[in-house]
């Protein structure tokens, strides 16, 4: 009875957000790992170029997430969500025009507008609805992001394997995949257009002019950036996201080119990694609510760093799968606690700005990871490059622990 009453306290608007998020992110993630780096490689892209292409959409978020979140505090969430959903829904068809690796860059930058504008706004809307249960409900909400990551990789990788009849995919195979992804994107846009206008927003005093919107936006951003705990917490996710960005870009290439496995297994490994996080996140969210946010962050960073360093030592699918499980657990520990801690620390009227700054710092890490490792791979190879980044994670974690203990 108590469980039933507890479920009834979850606002219906939260479930509407979940439906919109699931549909939009499924399309977006089908366009990413393992399809995108393999597409770039098939067009002759170097490792450095592959890293830049994969990072391009995240770079957009570095510049747009913070202002998008802050502006949504003033003009409301619905308009911003609808615009982001439109970019999610229509951009996949641009990939059909690609015939060379450099053409992927502007498309990825544009595609990144979707998550840059939509991401912090939908997180702020979810956090505002969650109340005292931020850890648990944001864990469920972030589960959608990672679940669609797993689902998108599995669907796109499996479809690409079938289209190529188990062999090396052609450029035409990739165009067909992106046409299918475009169909999924249109469906996501239809769902968003249907649900978003029906979402009520909390009553708020809206800015009356562009100048007032600008003034309030800047004030919210400055307030958040001056908050040391918010920036420090966001930095932890940013550093962890460096490894996620690297795995987005180079796990498929390592599995296919170095380990000698096929593209379907590359997609399956990504699904195992992200699926582990999906399963673990609700429990991690409850732990975060009950026992605090900081300890899970530290444990999660260690669980990410160690298997990440070990990946280049193995070519066995089953060993790589075990390492993916460990990494997925670490990712669940970190991401369920960082977002909730930022929401705890932020003022309600600046929640969108806080989530925007959080997203900007997280995206900075996710963009830098594949760019840096892409440059290092040609010079020192997978094992030294992955080991260096793993060591950086552990060093940053030690700094986080020390900073908290001396605060």
Image: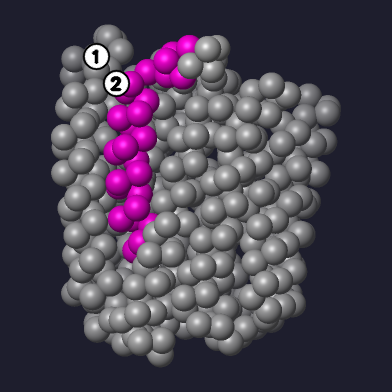
Percent x, y of residue 30: 36, 61
Percent x, y of residue 210: 20, 24
Q: Residue furthest front?
A: 1
Badge 1 crowding class, 10 Å Cα cut-off, few under 14, some 14 to 19, many 20 or more, is: few
Secondary element at tag 2: helix
Q: Is residue 188 left or right of residue 56?
A: left
Cα separation, mark 1 vs mark 2, equals 6 Å
Q: Residue 74 bears which disc, if any?
A: 2
Q: Is residue 195 left or right of residue 385?
A: left
Q: Where on the picture, by quarter, is residue 310?
A: bottom right
Badge 2 crowding class, 10 Å Cα cut-off, few under 14, some 14 to 19, many 20 or more, is: many
Q: Residue at x 37, y 18 (%)?
A: 11
Q: N-terminal of the two: label 1 or label 2? A: 2
Q: Is residue 224 visible?
A: yes
Q: Residue at x 62, y 48 (%)?
A: 331
Q: Please state which of residues 106 and 257 is positioned toward the viewer in this rendering.
A: 257
Q: Residue at x 32, y 37 (%)?
A: 19
Position of residue 10 relative to residue 296, above or below, is above
Q: Which residues are magenta?
A: 5-31
Position of residue 153 relative to residue 366, above or below, is below
Q: Are marks 1 and 2 in contact (CB under 8 Å)?
A: yes
Tally of marks: 2
């Amino acid at each position: 009875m108590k469980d039933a009453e507890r479920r009834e306290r979850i606002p219906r608007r939260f479930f509407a957000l979940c439906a919109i998020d699931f549909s939009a992110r499924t399309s977006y993630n089908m366009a990413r790992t393992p399809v995108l780096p393999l597409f770039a490689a098939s067009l002759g892209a170097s490792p450095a170029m592959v890293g830049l292409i994969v990072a391009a959409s995240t770079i957009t978020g570095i510049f747009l997430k913070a202002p998008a979140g802050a502006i949504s505090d003033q003009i409301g969430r619905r308009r911003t969500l609808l615009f982001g959903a439109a970019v999610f829904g229509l951009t996949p068809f641009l990939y059909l025009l690609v015939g060379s690796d450099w053409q992927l860059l502007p498309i990825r930058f544009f595609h990144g507008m979707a998550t840059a504008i939509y991401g912090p706004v939908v997180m702020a809307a979810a956090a505002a609805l969650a109340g005292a249960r931020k850890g648990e409900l944001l864990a469920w909400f972030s589960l959608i992001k990672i679940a669609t990551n797993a689902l998108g990789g599995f669907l796109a990788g499996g479809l690409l394997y079938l289209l190529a009849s188990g062999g090396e995919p052609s450029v035409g195979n990739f165009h067909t995949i992106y046409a299918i992804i475009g169909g999924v994107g249109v469906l996501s846009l239809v769902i968003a257009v249907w649900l978003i206008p029906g979402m009520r927003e909390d009553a708020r005093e809206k800015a009356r002019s562009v100048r007032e919107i600008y003034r309030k936006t800047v004030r919210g951003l400055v307030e958040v950036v001056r908050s040391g705990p918010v920036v420090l917490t966001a930095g932890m996710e940013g550093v962890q996201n460096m490894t996620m960005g690297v795995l987005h870009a180079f796990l498929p290439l390592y599995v296919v080119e170095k380990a000698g496995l096929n593209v379907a297994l590359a997609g399956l490994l990504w699904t195992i990694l992200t699926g582990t996080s999906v399963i673990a996140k609700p429990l991690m969210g409850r732990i975060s609510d009950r026992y605090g946010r900081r300890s899970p962050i530290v444990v999660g960073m260690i669980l990410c760093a160690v298997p990440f360093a070990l990946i280049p030592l193995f070519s066995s699918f089953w060993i790589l799968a075990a390492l993916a499980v460990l990494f997925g657990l670490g990712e669940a520990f970190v991401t369920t606690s960082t977002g909730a801690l930022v929401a705890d620390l932020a003022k309600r009227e600046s929640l969108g700005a806080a989530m925007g700054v959080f997203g900007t710092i997280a995206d900075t890490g996710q963009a830098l990871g594949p760019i840096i490792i892409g440059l290092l791979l040609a010079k020192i190879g997978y094992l030294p490059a992955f080991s260096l980044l793993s060591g950086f994670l552990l060093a940053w974690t030690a700094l986080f622990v020390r900073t908290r203990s001396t605060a």
